[in-house]
Image (spheres, rainbow, N blue to C red):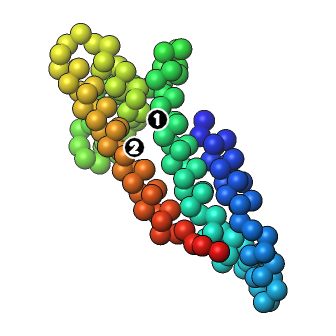
Amino acid sequence: MTLPTIIISTRAALKAVPPSIRDAALGVGASKMQSVFHHVLPLAMPGVLTGTIIGLAQALGETAPLLLIGMVGYVATNTPDGFIDGFVSPNSAMPAQIYEWAKRADPAFYERAWGGIIILLVFLLSMNIIAIILRRKFERRW
């Protein structure tokens, strides 16, 4: 679901690098691979990172409509037995778990759903902050 967004933004970022950068690298004796890895990719990296973050945010946002139209998936019902078991046992996606918690009548499940929503929100905000920091770090002027 996120691959088209990431691919389109990556292609646009690679096309945004001026051809003069490639020509200059080839003109001073760099091979095509060296010009791509040392000049083109570092200049296109902010666009690639932004597209990746947008794709992940889109995937988080589009999970709820998929659940409403009948997406069937695994929903974890038990808590893991131990710390390692939590990583190796089958788990459900957080939006699916929030949906399952929100449709229950018990108020404790509403609190769990709100906790899951807050965790997703913090995760999304941290991804965006990391993307901004990395974009500013890798951004170069030509």
Label 1 belongs to which residue? 60
Specify whether 29 is left or right of 88.
right
Q: How many marks?
A: 2
Q: Earlier in the sequence, mark 1 or mark 2?
A: 1
Q: Is residue 2 above or below residue 100?
A: below
Residue topped by disc 2: 124
- For the residues labelled 1 and 2, say whether their Cβ atoms are less than 8 Å apart: yes
Q: Quadrant of residue 139?
A: bottom right
Amino acid type, mark 2:
Leu
Residue 88 visible in the picture: no
SS for dot 1: helix
Q: CA distance from mark 1 to mark 2?
A: 8 Å
Label 2, secondary structure: give it. helix
Image quarter of residue 31: bottom right
| Quadrant, the C terminus | bottom right
Where is residue 39? Give x, y as percent: 67, 76
Residue 24 percent coordinates (x, y): 78, 82
30 above or below 42? below
Q: Residue at x 46, y 35 (%)?
A: 60
From this viewpoint, which residue is outermost toward the left? Answer: 108
Q: Is residue 134 above or below residue 95?
A: below
User: Residue shown at 29%/32% (left/top)?
Assistant: 116
Quadrant of the drawing holding the N terminus: top right
Location of residue 134 in the rendering, given as x and y in whole percent from the top left corner:
47, 63
Q: Position of residue 27 (x, y in %)?
A: 82, 86
Q: Viewed as shown, does residue 118 lie left or right of 94?
A: left
